[in-house]
Amino acid sequence: MSRYIPPEQNKAGQVFDIAVVVVAIFVALWLPLKLGLAGAAKSIDALDAKTWDALGQNATMAAIWEKLGYTPETAHDIIQNRFHYIIDWPTLIIMAVVLIGYFVFLFRASDREYREVINEKFDDK
Amino acid sequence: MTVAIETGQTVIHGDRVSLLRVLGPAHVWALGVGIVLVGEFTGWNFAADKGGALAALIVCWIVGLLYTSVAMIDSEVTSTVAAAGGQYAQAKHIVGPLMAFNVALFLVFAYTMLEVSDAILLGDTIVAKAGVEGLTHNSFIAATIVVLAWLNYRGVLMTLNVNFVITAVAYISIIILFFSVSPWTQGAVLKLNELVTPGNALPYGWIGVIAAFQFGIWYYLGIEGTTQAAEEVRSPARSLPYGTMAGMITLLIAAAMTWYVCASLMPWEYLGITYYPLWDAGKLTGSPLLENLLFIATLLAALASANGCINDAARAWFSLGRDRYLPSWFSAVHPKYRTPYRSILFLLPIALAFAFIADLNQAITFSILSGVLQYTFMSINIMMFRKKWPLGSIRRGYTHPFHPLPAIVLFCLCVVTFFAIFLGFGSQLIAMVAFYFLISLWFHFYRYKFVRRGDQFTMPWPKPQGY
């Protein structure tokens, strides 16, 4: 197998590639934050009666909340801020397809590249 | 072609000066535990938010099993593929270039976002302690990231010596707290029976336990970072398995003690949202000494973790440059300090930017996502490694037992963790995977043309079976 000689990349090309990677990193990490896609999907189940009892706190728990500087009113939004685990099947299926598709692409494309590496490495000897 | 020659402490790749071989097993332990121990001081407790206090304990043990599998698999592969970049070098030799490129990005993102989380934690802890109105965490975050980057720039030995000391102090603080609250007696200080009751132990039921896997990862995330030092340890075959396994045992003990004390001192709703569970535990004992000790330990744990993360992320980035997966400009080693200084400096503003725009649990989730993608790769990687080079075909520094059971356990737990992330953070997961997919297309169809083919394979192994 003939040995692959990669093209030399000039400085402008290197700078451009660095810029692409930086932009990609910021888009990947910053965009979900900007679009509100990052963070926990929680919501507050508000109660009318804001007492330790209504919030499901026994005497020991109430004493600790108070030691931490909370009252039933200020603790209400913490205690009642809950996850609601309803499985959204279309989203779950999309997630599974995206993940499986990603890994299948990774392994298949990697294998094609790997065969070139092995052929060149071992055919040289 | 690049030829690696060992000359005493220095490894020379062709005509390039490379990294110094100066580290021992204690440094490997310090690197692994140093990165991870902060997880006991913050982050693991968000598992209680997702599933309740008991769920946080269940995932502590089950995720401990996941990481024991990671440590076993990693020890075998890394003691055989001893090169900077850790799992990146493994992927390059076992799976292929595109996978290696992705694995390096997983590593860089996992560690950089962990560093960001550490800096936010440190800044918030100081601000909370100061109690001064108008004081923000920004200056503390910037100082932390810049000073630690400078320390990493100056040399790996000094960096990891510092890590060893501060990690040991932070770890001892957990032990002191544990024995100070009379753990053998309930009712005096600890009130587990009154705080974790049959009615609130699993507030969301078993689906909450599965959901809690996401932050259960935080108990141990980063222990696999020990492999990043592979090119800088004096005896990789001995130091890496020993340091990694010792680190895992250390962390399992710390995680169990941390859960027991914290769950016995505060209601799960509070435990699930506080940024400083151990510092809060110190406060709730009523002892100013313990409160101050845990305050200092929280800062030290955050510093040690951020320090190790800068070390690891820079080495993964450096490796990408060295193989031309990214511009080779990143592969420069400092002529005096022998560190990957350009990679350290390049990642510095990225960490700073995200420390200012993300909050703690968002940064943690970014880090966890990249970590779980990497563990999924590892479970498949070990199967391919054993198939391409069966036992006896090459010299292994360490051979892990019960193969393929650890790989299967790891893979199954990764699938459960993906589902856990979907429960509450699904959009973030899809956005991150979409990014990795797009950047993979860029690499495969464009960037890879600059990469020398055969030169990527640097191990003195026979041709893999099946090729």
Image (spheres, coloured by chain):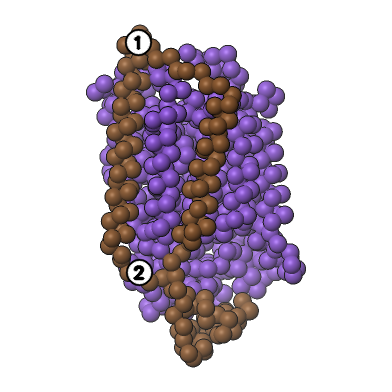
List the residue tagged with mark 2.
A85
Dot 1 falls on a residue whose secondary structure is: loop
- The three-letter code of the residue at mark 1 reads Ser
Tell me the quarter of the picture where residue A74 sits: bottom right
In the rendered view, tell whether residue B157 sits above or below residue B48: above
Q: The disc numbered 1 marks a residue on which chain?
A: A
Residue B97 has which mark? none
Tell me the quadrant of the picture where the N terminus of chain A can be found. top left
Q: CA distance from mark 2 to mark 1?
A: 57 Å
Dot 2 falls on a residue whose secondary structure is: loop
Report the front residue among B58 and A84.
A84
> Mark 1 Cα within 10 Å, few/some/many (few <14, many 20+)?
few
Q: Position of residue B269 (x, y in %)?
A: 49, 74
Q: Is residue B168 visible?
A: no
Residue A2 has which mark? 1
Chain A's colour is: brown
Figure label count = 2
Residue sitting farthest toward the left: B466
Residue sitting farthest toward the bottom: A49
The residue located at (37%, 49%) in the rendering is B66
In the rendered view, tell whether residue B154 sits above or below residue B13: below
Residue sitting farthest toward the top: A125
Of labels 2 and 1, earlier in sequence is 1
Q: Position of residue B317 (x, y in %)?
A: 53, 34
The residue located at (58%, 13%) in the rendering is B15
Chain B's colour is: purple
Q: Is residue B7 left or right of residue B259?
A: right
The residue located at (28%, 60%) in the rendering is A90
Q: The disc numbered 2 marks a residue on which chain?
A: A
- The three-letter code of the residue at mark 2 reads Tyr
